[in-house]
């Protein structure tokens, strides 16, 4: 199956900046992450988004992709034996090559993502909590060098510390110098003769790290919190990545949330709405009294100002919306039935035309008005 265009996958154009590419990736990664999205194809879409980001966020990979699309950079021209020489090597020979990343230079660690499940009210009011995540950290025994304490890595004598080897080959274009990753040091530019026993020469070890997280009041389902510097450890003295906490908020049995507003339904009897009443309504901060005017219709909405969710950015507080629902009893005593029949006879068995515009419209429709 052919691959989709990477720019189309991330929804950015070819001139998008690195920040724009990163922003698009994070948005889609949150959407399709298997821990959040349970659709059957979520894993494949997540992988597709990650592949697109890995290519477009790397200047060298992006440059090759812009020229040759999904063509393998190590694949030679069709029909000719170039000894494994690829497009990148030939362009390096003719145009002096692009900027190569220093294998020994500092590199930032990878970002991590953690999904935190919250109860409805925990998301509303926020909380301080502690999470535990697995991540790679710099080995304390060798301080990240990978070498046994008291020793240090040696510069690779085959590549001179560059991590690359120049291989000369004869091609139809003439004598070509191809650059290859040095197989002696695996592109690292250094050889570790005596490896650290703790990390086996990797310079990193995997640990479970406990991290304190302050969940802000008003956080909503699907939103995320960035915890700076709590991602994977960097390499060669580079800074660590960041941790992104994505929130999964459980629904509430009584309240519904839309943005910063809260919605609920209050069941009332016919007598309460007909005669009027004062009722107690549950809110996020306890019960409040609400006056129900006589003649209130089912479906009527009342607003309780500032009884909703505090804005996560500190910009005020939402409202609570109370919808009235008249409950019709499923069973009646004979006395209750007689009283209702008496009431029906007194009113002529018809709805009040002044107070019920819907039934008035129905009658006019039957009359042809």
Image (tube, grey):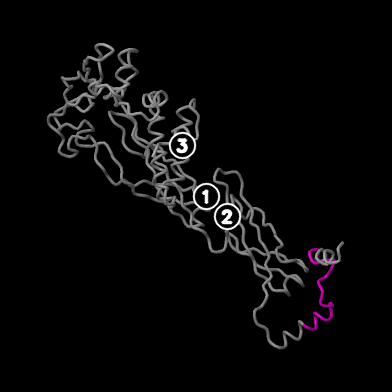
Which quadrant of the figure has residue 269? bottom right
Mark toward the start of the polypeptide (1 vs 2): 1
- Reply yes or no: does residue 343 show up in magenta: yes
**Quarter of the figure that contains the N terminus:** top left
Mark toward the start of the polypeptide (3 vs 1): 3
Secondary structure of the residue carrying numbered label 1: loop
Mark toward the start of the polypeptide (3 vs 2): 3
What residue is rendered at 32% in x and 26% in y? 73
Residue 36 percent location from the top left of the image? 43, 50
Q: Is 193 in front, or is 68?
A: 68
What residue is rendered at 72% in x and 62% in y? 300
Spatial CA distance of label 3 from label 2 is 31 Å
Figure disc tally: 3
Residue 81 percent location from the top left of the image? 24, 22
Residue 233 percent location from the top left of the image? 31, 36
Q: Please give the label number shown on residue 9.
A: 3
Question: Height in image: 221 above or below 179?
Answer: below
Residue furthest to the front: 79
The span shown in magenta is 341-359
Q: Please give the label number shown on residue 257.
A: 2
Residue furthest to the bottom: 334
Which quadrant of the figure has residue 103? top left
Q: Is 351 in front, or is 7?
A: 7
Residue, disc 1: 220
Spatial CA distance of label 3 from label 1 is 26 Å
- Reply yes or no: does residue 135 show up in magenta: no
Whether label 1 touches label 2, CB < 8 Å: yes
What residue is rendered at 16% in x and 35% in y? 196
Residue furthest to the left: 194
Whether label 3 touches label 2, CB < 8 Å: no
């Amino acid at each position: 199956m052919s691959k989709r265009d990477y720019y189309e996958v991330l929804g950015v154009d070819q001139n998008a900046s690195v920040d724009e590419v990163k922003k698009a990736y994070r948005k889609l990664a949150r959407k399709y992450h298997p821990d959040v999205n349970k659709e059957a194809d979520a894993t494949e879409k997540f992988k597709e988004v990650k592949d697109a980001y890995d290519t477009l966020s790397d200047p060298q990979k992006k440059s090759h992709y812009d020229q040759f699309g999904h063509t393998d950079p190590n694949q030679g021209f069709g029909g000719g034996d170039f000894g494994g020489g690829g497009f990148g090597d030939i362009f390096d020979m003719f145009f002096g090559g692009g900027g190569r990343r220093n294998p020994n230079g500092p590199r930032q660690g990878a970002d991590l993502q953690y999904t935190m499940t919250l109860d409805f009210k925990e998301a509303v009011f926020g909380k301080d909590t502690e999470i535990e995540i697995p991540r790679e950290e710099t080995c304390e025994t060798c301080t990240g060098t990978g070498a046994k304490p008291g020793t240090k890595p040696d510069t690779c004598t085959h590549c001179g510390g560059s991590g690359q080897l120049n291989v000369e080959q004869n091609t139809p274009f003439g004598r070509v110098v191809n650059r290859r990753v040095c197989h002696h040091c695996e592109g690292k530019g250094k050889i570790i003769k005596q490896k650290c026993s703790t990390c086996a020469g990797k310079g990193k070890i995997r640990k479970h790290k406990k991290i304190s997280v302050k969940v802000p009041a008003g956080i909503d389902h699907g939103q995320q919190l960035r915890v700076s510097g709590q991602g994977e450890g960097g390499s060669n003295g580079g800074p660590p990545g960041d941790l992104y906490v994505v929130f999964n908020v459980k629904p509430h049995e009584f309240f519904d949330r839309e943005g910063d507003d809260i919605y609920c339904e209050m069941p009332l009897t016919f007598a309460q709405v007909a005669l009027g009443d004062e009722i107690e309504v549950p809110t996020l901060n306890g019960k409040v009294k609400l006056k129900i005017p006589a003649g209130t219709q089912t479906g009527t909405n009342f607003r309780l100002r500032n009884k909703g969710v505090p804005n996560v950015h500190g910009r005020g507080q939402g409202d609570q919306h109370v919808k009235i629902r008249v409950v019709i009893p499923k069973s009646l005593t004979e006395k209750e039935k007689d009283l209702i029949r008496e009431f029906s006879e007194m009113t002529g068995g018809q709805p009040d035309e002044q107070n019920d515009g819907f039934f008035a419209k129905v009658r006019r429709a039957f009359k042809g008005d």
